[in-house]
Amino acid sequence: MQHNLTVYNTLTRTKEKFEPIHPAMVGMYVCGPTVYSDVHLGNCRTFDSFDLIYRYLLHLGYKVRYVRNITDAGHLEGDNDEGDDKFAKKARLEQLEPMEIVQKYTLGFHDVLRMFNTLPPSIEPTATGHISEQIEMIKQIIANGYAYEVNGTVYFDVDKYTKEHNYTILTNRNLEDLLNNTRELGGQDEKYGRLDFALWIKAKPEHIMRWSSPWSVGFPGWHIECSAMSRKYLGDQFDIHGGGMDLAATHHTNEIAQSEACNSVQPAKYWMHTNMLTVNGTRMSKSAGNGFLPHELFTGDHPLLNKGYSPMAVRFFMLQAHYRSTLDFSNEALEAAEKGYKRLMAAIGLLNKIVPAAKSDIDIDLKVLRARCYAAMDDDFNSPVLIAELFELVRLINSVYDGKQQLDQGALESVRELIQHFVFDVMGLSDDQLGSDQESVERLMEIIINIRNEAKKNKDFTVSDRIRQELAEIGIQLKDSRDGTLWNKI
Ligand code: AMP
Ligand code: ZN
């Protein structure tokens, strides 16, 4: 592989050359959604950003094991291991079982990501499916002296950990400041230290989602699931750990501490964080109530939206910003992105209509342009720069179509290859004019039936019979009726 991929590592706060631990298999773990409600567009931005990263690694020829978890247990509403279980609360509200809530929102999450053309991960483990792995890990952390039990609840001992490790390694915060900004322990508190966090929580009688453990009937804390599942599927040390920037200060900081305390090694070589999607400068979030649901965006059915946008136009909008920059939502920005996306797709549509010339006569060097596309992606997955390079191709295609420049067969192939690699494979865009698979089938059948009927009209029965026969062989039956030719699957 001739590429010089560099990635920004939150851990070292620098761009580093990407050198996987085991080049034969890149391990990537991304914190997935908490499935007690619909995902909003902000969540989608993070998953689409990691989709771009995943796609580019695949494109470069790496084998990647991409693990993205589903958090379906253990989230309490409060920040301090307190409050109601989010799943149980939602289940009461919707009069469903907690696991029905999990199923409903997991399916919704998958539907949305499919619309955005996001590739599924290699493994999608759930927290509730890995309770025993979490218990084993907690046992090991206790055995190594970094956790303690009080009344059936197990806490991570941050004070003990900081004596030998840098607890704030990921965010570089000052531990003193952090302590000063954390509320003091009250009389009710069982924790030894203010920064200690729960690994296992003893269930109150009303808590529905509960499991047996050596300490109590209870449930795991929020952070332990990712340490346990990444370890199970990717090993004690793997290449990339990712998630939204908002997860770095607590969730990922605690994940590193747990994994180090258990395995004595830093879990991930590169920590990658995506920046936030904002609305008028405020982070889009479930709690702030400013979260657009993707279907609201697609239909335009939201007070802040002037109209609806196709999933691919929205994906393009997100790709126009680098994953480490904030991206502010506005109708103007979306409209501009939609125009850009349509210009790109229109040019790609013209490619099939271009007749190659005997000799190329173009004002750009395609080899240089290709190198610049790779350079953009090699520079920490810089999709906005890649898009700018691809618009050079758009300009070229339009100019060739207008007869102002000429492409020979080889150059035309090079343009097609660049489009296939970067627009479709790497950026994961598709032409939304083609619609869903079902719509495509309907349109293809319409075309085939029209050709058959024309053949019949011209008394070319060899062709019309062949079409009927070959469709029948793949289980499609044609029926001629007064309303035209209908088709169905046998
Ligand atoms: P959650 O379901 O809230 O745990 O979030 C799932 C993922 O979405 C996490 O990686 C979050 O960091 C990420 N996320 C949440 N809000 C935003 C946002 N406004 N912009 C980008 N990513 C976000
Ligand atoms: Zn996580």
Image (spheres, rainbow, N blue to C red):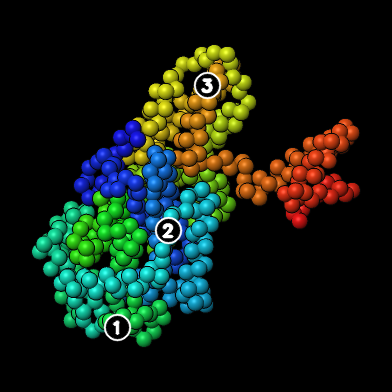
Secondary structure category for the residue under label 2: loop
Precedes in sequence: disc 1 or disc 3:
1
Task: Mark 2 and ligand 2: say if the CB distance to the nearest ligand atom is below 8 Å.
Answer: no
Query: In this rendering, is residue 359 above or below 133?
Result: above
- Say what amino acid the circle numbered 3 marks: Gly
Q: Position of residue 334 (x, y in %)?
A: 49, 42
Toward the viewer: 431 or 303?
A: 431
Eye-nearest disc, 1 or 3: 3
Up-down: is 104 above or below 277? below
Looking at the image, residue 99 lies above or below residue 480: below
Q: CA distance from mark 3 to mark 2?
A: 40 Å
Which residue in the structure is indicated by mark 1?
Answer: 216
Of 288 and 133, which appears nearest the observer?
Answer: 133
Disc 1, SS: loop
Residue furthest out toward the left? 163
Question: At label 1, which amino acid type do we have?
Answer: Ser
> Going by the picture, which residue comes out furthest to the bottom?
205
Residue 404 in view in this figure: no
Helix, strand or loop at label 3? It is: helix
Residue 123's disc number: 2
- Real-space Cα distance between discs 2 and 1? 30 Å
One can see residue 410 in this view = yes
Q: Quadrant of residue 19?
A: top left
Disc 3 designates what residue?
Answer: 410
Q: Residues within 10 Å of mark 1 (few under 14, many from 20)?
A: some
Image point 48% across, 63% down: which residue?
Answer: 106
Q: Is residue 251 left or right of residue 165?
A: right
How far from the left and from the top, in percent, is residue 44? 44, 53
Residue found 51% across the figure and 41% down from its top: 429
Q: Mark 3 and 2 residues: CB-CB less than 8 Å, in contact? A: no
Is 161 positioned to the left or the right of 86 in the image? left
